[in-house]
Image (cartoon, helix red, strand yellow):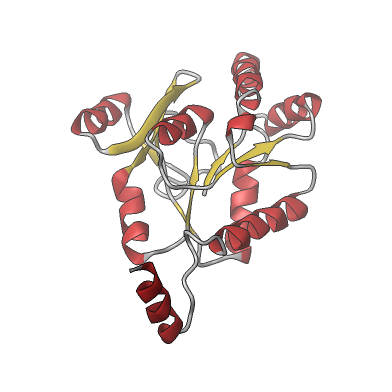
Amino acid sequence: MILSAPSGAGKTTLCNRLMEKLPDIKFTTSHTTRSPREEEIDGEDYFFVSETEFNKMKERGDFLEWARICDNLYGTAYQSIKNSHAKGQDFILELDVQGAKSLHEIKYPGVFVFILPPSLEELTARLKNRATESEETINRRLETGRKEIKQCLTYDYILTNCDVEETVDNLISIIKAEKCKTARFTPPAKDIQALLNWKEE
């Protein structure tokens, strides 16, 4: 699942709550050049790196996708998803609109979900209430958020995060439904698997 939302829409809170309800789901940890906020932990929330180190990774082709957002670089390293792919695990990529667009362009086989705030007014209030950034940075994030919201129709699903528990339940419903799609479904019974493989042949 590729999950996008404007800054302040509650994406991190939703992912944390989703992980509590679905402990088997994996979340990729992105690299970023921005400074960590007070409560953030390096290696858990993000891998915080210098711009020089980030650019070296980019030149080596280490990133599945990367983007510059509000003067900072963000990227998803192939290594972050390699193990989950190999084990057949479900995992979530938290990506901005630019990152999601780059995956769309390479036809990445994911489920794209956009999280909307209840309103632009509420989005502004949430960013200001965080009290972690300057007025100038908040205004840049709001302007970026408006542009991102305009891209939501390119996603497979759109959810409005008015209530965290309801939104998490809707995310779980999407995951369950997607697992039942023909392209992803695997019958639990070995004999039925064999029968279906025979039919495909």
In the rendered image of this protein, does residue 86 appear above or below residue 30? below
Residue 53 image-quadrant placement? top left
In the rendered image of this protein, does residue 148 appear above or below residue 117? above
Determine if residue 21 is in view: yes
In the rendered image of this protein, does residue 163 appear above or below residue 127? below
Left or right of 72 in this view: 18:
right
Determine if residue 35 is in view: no
Q: Name the residue located 79 percent from the left edge and 48 percent from the top edge.
A: 163
Q: Name the residue located 70 percent from the left edge and 54 percent from the top edge.
A: 170
The image shows residue 37 at horizontal and vertical percentages of 53, 36
Q: Name the residue located 24 percent from the left edge and 33 percent from the top edge.
A: 57
Left or right of 44 in this view: 174:
right
Residue 18 image-quadrant placement? bottom right
In the rendered image of this protein, does residue 200 appear above or below residue 6? below
The image shows residue 138 at horizontal and vertical percentages of 64, 20
Residue, far left: 60
The image shows residue 177 at horizontal and vertical percentages of 62, 60
The image shows residue 46 at horizontal and vertical percentages of 43, 42
Residue 197 image-quadrant placement? bottom left
Which of the image's four quarters has the C terminus? bottom left
